[in-house]
Image: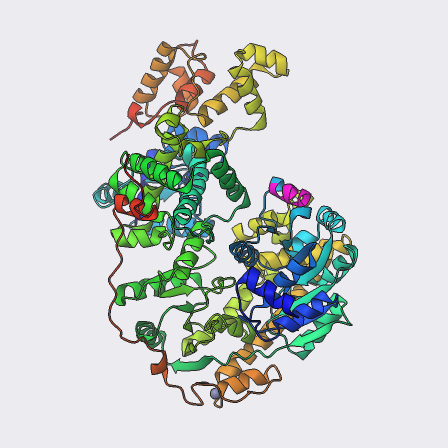
Amino acid sequence: MTTLEATLKERFGFEAFRPGQKEVIEDILKGHDVFCMLPTGSGKSLCYQLAGELLGGLVVIVSPLVSLMEDQVEALRLHGEKRAAALNSFLGREEKERLLRSLHECRFLYISPEMLQSERVRRALKRANVTLFVVDEAHCVSEWGYEFRPDYLKLGAIREDIGRPPCLAMTATADEKTRADIIARLGIAHCRLHLYGVDRPNIAIAVEKMDTGAEKLERLIELVTNLQSPGIVYFSSRKAAEAVHAVLRSRTKVRTAYYHAGMDAEERLLVQNQFFYDQLDVVCATTAFGMGINKANVRYVIHFHYPLYVNAYLQEIGRAGRDGKPSVAIALVAKEDHLLPERLIHREFPEVDRLPALIRSIRTAGSALDRAAAEAVLTEAGLSETAGRFLVETLSALDEEGRKPLHDVIRRIEKRIAERKAVKFRELSIMREWLETTGCRRQAMLRLFHEEKAGNAGDCCDACGLDLNVYRKPCAQGRETPLLDPWQKRLAKLFGCAAPAR
Amino acid sequence: MTFEQFLILSLIHRFRGERSASAVYHLLKGKRTAQTIQDGFLYQVHVYFQTLKSLTRQEWQALMEDLSRSGRWILNDGNRCLLTEEGLQALEAARSRFELPTGLDGWFYGRAAEKIWSRLSLLVQTASHLIAKQPRFLPVVRDDATLRWIKGYLKAVGRDREALAAGLYNELVALCSRFPEREATLLSNRLSGSGMAGKTIDQMAVLLSRPETETLLWFQSGLHRTAKVLTAKQSASSFPLLSRLAKDIDAGLTASSAKTYELLKKGLGVEDIARLRRLKTATVQDHIVEIAFCDPEFSIRPFVNESAERLVKQVLKRTRTRRLSAIKQALPADIDYFHIRLVLARMNDRDDVGSDA
Ligand SMILES: [Zn+2]
């Protein structure tokens, strides 16, 4: 099929498909429902983007994160596809209306699951010619997964409602049990399965253990100074990301910045773009960073705090080495780090004894309060964003079953919290077990997904023997500290000095 | 003392112990309520309106706890907040370490500045990529309305890329040379162009060895000046390209006040408007006060004559209190609350309102 390759070259500028892409696209074009598991960084989104170009009509992509949606829309625009748009609750009313009225001019519509609950939106989609219904991050459908989102449960019914277009469910990582769950929930029993391994052989894996946080910091400074940049260092708190960034800035010559969801949108974009343009060596970030960053040459990912779940770990290290060149993932673990994860999990949920007050605070305004506003009220009350979203989602799911007395609602939510926490603690213990493996780390990781290691391509892991010198910069000479340009010079640079003075 | 503490102490000091601490919080966050804005003008702090928009409740509480604890700088009983003797001394001592910018005008220009900045940064980035012949880039602004707006702008301007870049360059040089050096440096270095992403506030603060929040305020000061220059009626002649960025930015009036404003512009008086719209005269007066508070170009002269304005300003200068009823009592009977509120909306730092320094 040469047309596929031609389109790939013409629209995306690639010479060849990566493993899996072509097969998935072919099945989509034949009109099958498709379940596809492709590892992070293997070009999942290209599958529906290219298929969409050939299918025509409107491709609807359900995506759980606003930032993720925006990044995808940006990526498409960068490739010259102007008919891409994102519909989420952060859009103003007017913008929303304008977008819904002009759906026929749109080729790719990214949409959050909560927007799909709106009758108005579904009516518009029914009228539009939806040729493909994509569920991105499909593992959110499964209650087995740590990223479960109640909103995702309704996606199967919603697809029926908008005329049952073919469905493409995509995820980077899902074990057997989760896969079966996803397929059942989405109602795609006859789908074509495309499963590709989670392994990324060009990323070497290491876990380094130390006694104290101070030792860890020293080791990080050493690594960041010597490793070939660019790199990402992940933290589990915003504060820690900022603090360690400040240490790196004062004690090394690497160009560093921090990144987390608490910064305003413009500052986040500036850091992303600086990283993209190689103006930074390292970004100290929370997991908010990297989701849609299409930077191929990231050489290392260091975890200053280990992630809570194996899936998250795979996603994060997967941001290294997308160009296929040797890269390294290093997790630094100090004893005191083990105190953090439990606290973080508890923070993802509202405290049970505050439930009555919290529920009242978002219900006093009646149904007038939309979800974004309700979440804002909850964060103002001191809840984490995740906890706020959990409560709003769970409440609205319960409300849909019909009004119930408050004590009943509270009892149901309490039960829900207990179940979700149990899932997360189970996932956390798997992550911890993996950190304690003494054998080959890659092997142990792959076994969690019922896969086997295929041969040995280059460095594998610290247990198999790993020479970090391979990942050093050629010469560790210091870089000049950047200065602020005087404004005259900066303006001249921005306009390429081409401007003749009048 | 941190810069944030310095800023909050300065503002508490300005409120003279007559307002609660949350008045400072609402001012910095930019809560658009009648109370916040009237306080802003009464105590001449409206220029700080919305200057720390991203301050969270938690951060604020932590700051207040620090201030009450460390050295007992403030007394806070929930209703009123004032500086202790120690706090006053600490504040005076800190004045040599920190520097507040002089161009802030948050109430009048904060909103416009935000919009103008997102348009300007996208326009500069676009022009920079166009002359580098790189039509594909990651825009620094991702909101659809602005992206569409710039598209329309480029069409309307209709210059080729060289002429556009040259024109923008010249106008930006002219604009920046009117500003203090530090503000011009911050504005220009935050702009992005081909192959170069702008710097964040934090990065610029480090490179200038100044506190982050101080740097943020200086940057905003530059933005507010920009908005002031570009929204002025006569700006089109000196800034033909940039002044267009300030077009169609509304004054942020409520719908009803906007309607009153339309009728005023047609030459109708207060009574006419009240009759026509079947409103009370007092309601129309409220609208006019709102207009005066929102649109710096709006003249209050048809409603307050010069001598009345002078009298009100004198009393405001003389009396220490900022309670409206006390101010009214010190004035002739024919000057009412409507007049006082209108004059307030036209006060600025230069009028030196009863400062106790
Ligand atoms: Zn190994």
Q: Nearer the viewer, residue A135 or B139?
A: B139
Residue drawn at point x = 34 percent, y = 18 percent: B313
Quadrant placement of the C terminus of chain B: top left
For this view, does A99 lie left or right of residue A131? left
Q: Position of residue A50 (x, y in %)?
A: 62, 62
Q: Nearer the viewer, residue B85 or A131?
A: A131
For this view, does B103 lie left or right of residue A9? left
Q: Is residue A96 above or below residue A144?
A: above
Q: Position of residue A488 (x, y in %)?
A: 26, 43
Q: Main secondary structure of the magenta part?
A: helix
- The quarter of the picture where residue A253 lies is bottom left
- Residue A98 belongs to magenta span: yes
- The quarter of the picture where residue B280 lies is top right
Q: Position of residue A270 (x, y in %)?
A: 41, 54
Residue A311 in view in this figure: yes
Q: Is residue A443 above or below residue A339?
A: below
- The quarter of the picture where residue B314 lies is top left
- Residue A477 belongs to magenta span: no
Residue drawn at point x = 74 percent, y = 48 percent: A119
Q: How is the image coloured?
A: rainbow
Q: Nearer the viewer, residue B231 or B88?
A: B231
The magenta region covers: A95-103
Q: Position of residue A241 (x, y in %)?
A: 40, 64
For this view, does B313 lie left or right of residue A446? left
Residue B19 in view in this figure: no
Q: Is residue A205 above or below residue A58?
A: below
